[in-house]
Each structure stands twice: as C-alpha cells, then as structure tokens.
Image: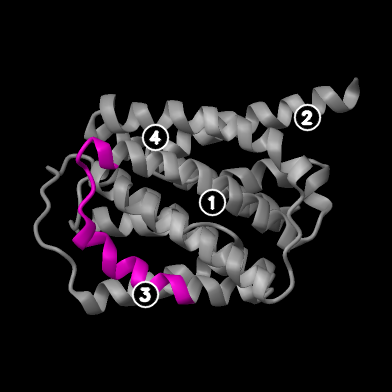
Amino acid sequence: MEQEVALFAICFALFLVSILYSSVGHGGASGYLAVLSLTSYGQLSSPWLKQHAWVLNLAVAGLAFYHYSKANHHIFSKTLPFIVASIPFAFLGGFLKIDGAIYDTLLSITLVYAAVRLLSNTSVEFVEATNPQRREAYTYGAGIGFVSGIIGVGGGIFLSPILLLKRWATPKSAAATAAMFIWVNSAAGLFGAAASNQLVIEPSTLLPFLFSVLIGGLIGSRYGALYAKQKTVQYLLVCVLLLASGKRIFEVVM
C-alpha cells in the first residue's frame, strides 16, 4: 500500500510539472529530474535518470510542438539552423558521462539570470525583428545541444530565453521552436547513450510516468498554444527557469 501511495505521489508531481512546462513548449526534463531526485529513484545512476527524463521529454515536447504548430506559431526556417547544429552535439553529450557540483552551480546561476532578464523585459512589445544570423544560430544550437546531452535535458530552458531576449521570437513562437528543439535533442541524447552502451531504460517503471506526463502535456500545451496570452506564457517560462535552477541548487546543497 505504501509503495502505491508513493508511486501515485510521484506520478501526480510529474503530471503537474508536465502541465507547467508544456504550456511554454518545453518537455519538462528539468522538472522530472527534480521530482525523481527527491525520491528513491534519485539514488539510481545518472544515465538512468537522464534517459527516463528524455523519454518523458519526447512525449511532452511532441504534444507541445503539435499544438503550437497547429495554432500557426511555428516558423520552420527559424528553427532549422538551431536543430541542425544541436543534434550532433546532443548526441556527443549523451555519449559522455559527466557530473559535478561546480557545473550544477554555474547552471543554476545561468537559469536565474535568464529568469531575471525575462522579468525585466515584460513591458516590451513582442515584435519579431529579424531571424538570427546562421552563424549565431549554429553556435547557440551546438552549445545548448552539448550541454543538454550532458545533463539530460532537451535545452528549451536555454533556448527560449535566448530567442526572447534577442528579439528573435514572440513567446509563443519561441515555445514552438523550443518544442521541436527539445524533441530532437532528447532523441539525439538517447541515441548517444545507446551508442556508448549506457542505455538502461526500464519500460515497467516508465509506463506510469509516461501516462501521467502525456495527460499533463496535453492540458498544458493546449492552454499555452490556444488560450494563454503572450505575457502569460512569458511569466510561465520564468516559473520554469526558477524551478529548474532551484532543483540544481538543491542538488549542490544536499
């Protein structure tokens, strides 16, 4: 009975995380890792945590991309250079196994900074000025892809604030681009793990988690794409960034 209650609590937490993240076009890996790290699953290996988070990412980011794209928020030409550069580097990051408290600290600082910058820009009108220069897009895509592969996320928590702060996208357009970016990076990370013989996915454990995030992802992505205002999506993104950074700080302190 106790195990069933614990499983329900985990699934419910994953459900809530998937609603929040999918509302801004994200898959939720940072949140899933946060939830799992606070349970007995947190004692398992880093590859186990990363890979299960990536699978959940694939499901939720796929739903998010579908709804944002269907609502005409996706601009493929804007997304393409980022994903072309990110795929091989996400594969490489997934191939490697790197840990460290220093890295987690730097990551937390980066996410908090992005959240603060976004909060300070809420009064600016959302106008898509120009597409990014290809060299810039390739650089950001490669860097984010590599980092995502190392820590087990899809990279949306990095790409979304860059798109907004650079005025390359509105919040909803950024959400659509981030969703596709997250999906391909998560897949590339899994392929990288498989190539290095680190694949440790447990279908029986994964299924209840997957069911929970699919429902949450459906709710969150529909809300973000169809009903939320642009500024609402931006505020939700700030919440996502703070949640992700809080998780990293908790890991360092503990």
Cα distance, mark 2 to mark 1? 25 Å
Cα distance, mark 1 to mark 3? 25 Å
Quarter-wise, where is residue 136 in the image?
bottom left
Cα distance, mark 3 to mark 2? 38 Å
Quickly name the residue at label 2.
7
Which color scheme does this rendered protein use?
one colour
The secondary structure type at the circle numbered 4 is loop
**Lower position in the chain sequence, tag 3 or tag 2:** 2
Residue depth check, mark 1 versus mark 3: number of the one nearer the observer: 3
Q: Is residue 107 left or right of residue 11?
A: left
Quarter-wise, where is residue 10 in the image?
top right
Q: Is residue 125 left or right of residue 139?
A: left
Cα distance, mark 4 to mark 2? 24 Å
Quickly name the residue at label 4.
23
Cα distance, mark 1 to mark 4? 18 Å
Q: Is residue 56 left or right of residue 222?
A: right
Question: Does 242 appear above or below 1?
Answer: below
Task: Write the residue at 69% across / 70% down.
Answer: 99
Horizontal and vertical percent for residue 252?
69, 58
Quickly name the residue at label 3.
85
The secondary structure type at the circle numbered 1 is helix
Q: Amino acid at mark 4?
A: Ser
Mark 3 surroundings within 10 Å by alpha-carbon count, few (fewer than 14), some (14 through 19), many (20 or more) = many
Q: Amino acid at mark 1?
A: Ser
The secondary structure type at the circle numbered 3 is helix
Label 1 near label 2: C-beta < 8 Å? no
Task: Write the residue at 68% across / 66% down.
Answer: 101
Quickly name the residue at label 1.
245
Mark 2 surroundings within 10 Å by alpha-carbon count, few (fewer than 14), some (14 through 19), many (20 or more) = some
